[in-house]
Image (cartoon, helix red, strand yellow):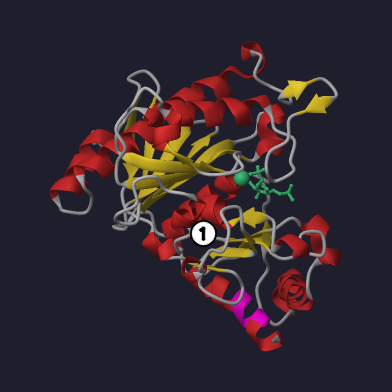
Amino acid sequence: MSNVSLTRHLLEEQRAGHISADLRLLIEVVARACKTISIAVGKGALGGVLGEAGTPGAASMNIQGEAQKKLDVIANDVLLEANAWGGHLAGLASEEMDHSMPIADLSPDGYPSGNYLLLFDPLDGSSNIDVNISVGTIFSVLRCPEGVAVPGDEHFLQPGTDQVAAGYCTYGPNTTLVLTVGHGTHAFTLDREVGSFMLTTHGMRIPEETKEFAVNMSNQRHWQPPMQRYIGDLLLGKEGPRGKDFNMRWVASMVADVHRILTRGGIFSYPLDAKCADKGGKLRLMYEANPMSLLVEQAGGAASTGRMRMLEVQPSGLHQRVPVFLGSKLEVEAAVRYHLDHD
Ligand code: AHM
Ligand code: MG
C-alpha cells in the first residue's frame, strides 16, 4: 500500500494545477461525510438504522416516488450538514430532494457561498441496505455559472463534460472512495484505524474487452428490440456471433457493479424498458450516469445512452433519467452498434 493519503493526493493535484484550493477542500468535505455515512451503514441493525423512513404504514417518499430508507435520509442529512459551512459551494442537489438548494437557504446563519455546485445520490442501491450488500454514495461537482449568486435548478443543467470532479464511495467489505478530477481515476481505501483514505490504486484501467455483463435479466421481456438482440447474442456464447462465452454479474447497487468494472472490466447496462420508458430510463443522469461515466472514461472505458456519448447529453431536468451502457470500451461500442443498426 502507498502512504499517499487522499489529502496529499489532492494537494498534489492542486500543485499540478488540476484543481483549485476550494475544489480540494470541497472534495475533502465530501470524503469526510462519506466516512460518517460508512460508520452509520456499518452499524446496521445495532444502530437502529435499517428499514424504511417515516411512520409504520406511511413510508416517506422521495421525488422519484420511491420509499425512502432510514439510511437514505441519514446519508442525505450528513451530506447537507457537512457541506453547509465549508464556503466552497453555491448550491447542492440530491436525488432525494425535490429541488436544488442554494447554500444561502441551507445556512441561515450566514455561512459564505462559493463557486461550485455539488450533486449527489446519498445512498445508491437502497434495495440492498437491509440485506448487508454493498451500497454507496455517488457525487458530481460542477462550476456555478459566473454571475450567479443564488443558483436555481436550471444552473445545474450542464452536460457531464462540464464536471470538474466526480466520484463514489462504496460501503462494502471495505470502504473505498473512487475519484476523478479529470486526470485519471484513482481509488482510496479507508484505513479504519487511522481514519484516513489511502491511495490504493493510482490510474485505474478498464480492459478494452470483456466477457462479463451486468444487467437486470428479469426485465428482458420489457426491453426494446436492439437490447433483446444484443443480450441474446451474448447468451449464445461461443456458438453465437460474438464467438465467446459471457458471464453475468448483477449486484443491483450501481456503485458495486461499476466498482467491479473499474477493477476487472465488464459492461454495465440499465437500458430503456417498457416499465421505465415513460420516464426515459431507470437511472438518473445527474446523480448516477454522469459521474460514473466520467470515472469510466477517465479509466479508459466508454459510457453511452446506447445512441450517444453520455457526457454530451444536454440535461433538461434535474431528475432526468437515461438508459445507461458503460464499461469496457469495445463492448460498449458493440452494444451501441446494435442500437444504431436498428435505428
Ligand atoms: P436507487 O438510487 O434508488 O438505489 O436506484 C438505483 C439502483 C442502482 O444502484 C441499481 O443499478 C439499480 O437501481 C437496481 O435496479 P433493479 O432493482 O432493477 O435491480
Ligand atoms: Mg441511486
Residue 236, image x, y percentages: 76, 73
Q: Which residues are magenta?
A: 335-339
Q: Reply above or below: 10 against 317.
A: above
Q: Residue 248 is drawn in which quadrant? A: bottom right
Residue 120, image x, y percentages: 50, 43
Left or right? Give the position of 24 relative to 306: left
- For image coordinates 28% across by 44% down, the residue present is 23
- Disc 1 designates what residue? 265
Q: Is residue 5 visible from the viewing direction of this image?
A: no
Residue 46, image x, y percentages: 64, 11
Q: Is residue 85 visible from the viewing direction of this image?
A: yes
Q: Residues within 10 Å of mark 1 (few under 14, many from 20)?
A: many
In the image, 152 versus 55, the foreground residue is 152
Q: Residue 275 is drawn in which quadrant? A: bottom right
In the image, 229 versus 14, the foreground residue is 14
Q: Residue 238 is drawn in which quadrant? A: bottom right
Single out the residue that lies furthest toward the top: 46
In the image, 194 versus 76, the foreground residue is 76
